[in-house]
Amino acid sequence: MVKPTSDITWATGGGALKTDPGSTKKAAGYLDNEKPAADHWNWLFNAIGDWIAWLSGNSQAGISKWEAGISYDQNDIVKATGGYGIYVSLANSNLNNALPSDIVSDSNWQYIGPYIENCTADPSSPSTGRMWLRTDL
């Protein structure tokens, strides 16, 4: 499937009214013959657009890049920013706990994926779990 290119932004202008309908209404949903308020629709479409934009810019092959300010739940999987290491969160509400700096685990993150690193010479002591790609050959 080809990635859509449609602009899905909604209610981003200064005069757009957006009102969160609240947890009670979100849990119950709208009833038959109930007409949702325009500002509730604007809020919903705006939120959907924001999430799709975030997912489109933050993920690659279905795995999101780790990002500060995001609260990760236990078992959430993330990719190291700037690298190829894949980690799983070991804690609920894992907020602002940076990934380990190498292919190791710590109390918040467990390393679970391959680590591929470009290099221009053979490593003197290769680490277990790493793949090296020679870029000078």
Image (spheres, rainbow, N blue to C red):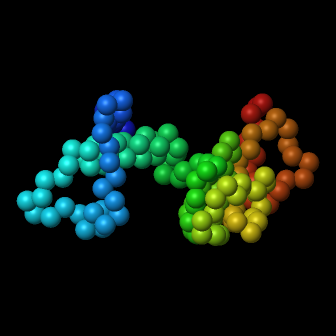
For residue 53, what is the image quadrant? top left
Mark yes or no: residue 1 visible.
no
Q: Position of residue 66 (x, y in %)?
A: 62, 51
Asked if residue 3 lies left or right of residue 71, the reply is left
Q: Quadrant of the N terminus?
A: top left
Of 99 and 19, nearer the camera is 19
The residue shown at (85%, 38%) is 121
Q: Position of residue 25 (x, y in %)?
A: 27, 63
Q: In which quarter of the image is the C terminus?
A: top right
Q: Position of residue 40 (x, y in %)?
A: 26, 49
Of 101 and 1, nearer the camera is 101
Of 121 and 94, nearer the camera is 94
Q: Relative to 87, say whether 137 is above or below.
A: above
The residue shown at (78%, 30%) is 136
Of 96 and 11, nearer the camera is 11
The residue shown at (71%, 54%) is 98
The residue shown at (78%, 52%) is 101
For residue 24, what is the image quadrant? bottom left
Asked if residue 1 lies left or right of residue 63, the reply is left
Q: Position of residue 103 (x, y in %)?
A: 76, 57
Q: Relative to 14, say whether 103 is above or below.
A: below
